[in-house]
Image (cartoon, helix red, strand yellow):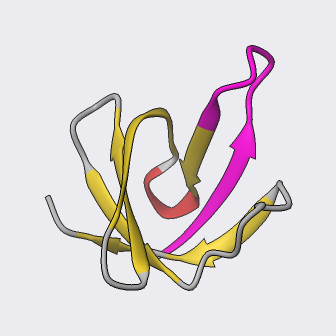
Amino acid sequence: MKVMLRLNQSGYLVVYVAKKDLEEEVVKQVETDGEKIFTLANGWELAIANLTEPMKLPKTVEARRIA
C-alpha cells in the first residue's frame, strides 16, 4: 500500500495511509535486513524497504502491513 511519511508540528514522524484515511505517529522503528519496521500508535506494523538515510520528508513510499 502507498503511504506518506512526514513530520508533524511536534517533530514526530507520522504515517498517512490515504486508502484508510489513517494518520498515526510512529512510536517505534526497527531496522532489519534492508527494510525498516515502523510501529504506529494504533498498533499497526509497517515494513518499508529501501529507505535512504537521511530521509527527505514528506515522502510517498510503498509499505507492507505485517501486523
Work out whether residue 53 or residue 46 is closer to the camera in this orientation and state it: 53
**3, above or below 62, in the image:** above
**35, above or below 5, in the image:** below
**57 sits left or right of 62 in the view:** right
**Looking at this rendering, what residue extends furthest in the left direction?**
67
Tell me which residue sits at (18%, 67%) in the image.
66
Queried whether the magenta region covers residue 8, the answer comes back as yes
Work out whether residue 61 or residue 37 is closer to the camera in this orientation and state it: 37
Tell me which residue sits at (66%, 54%) in the image.
5
Tell me which residue sits at (49%, 63%) in the image.
19
**33 sits left or right of 8 in the view:** left
Give the magenta-colored segment's residue range: 2-13
Work out whether residue 1 or residue 37 is closer to the camera in this orientation and state it: 37
Residue 27: x and y in percent read 39, 30
Residue 62: x and y in percent read 53, 81
**43 sits left or right of 12 in the view:** left
Tell me which residue sits at (74%, 14%) in the image.
10
> Which quadrant holds residue 42?
top left
Residue 47: x and y in percent read 35, 70
Q: In the rendered view of the protein, which quadrant contains the N terminus?
A: bottom left
Q: How many circles with numbers are drawn on the protein?
A: 0
Q: In the rendered view of the protein, which quadrant contains the C terminus?
A: bottom left
**57 sits left or right of 14 in the view:** right
> Which quadrant holds residue 20?
bottom left
Residue 37: x and y in percent read 34, 61
Queried whether the magenta region covers residue 63, the answer comes back as no
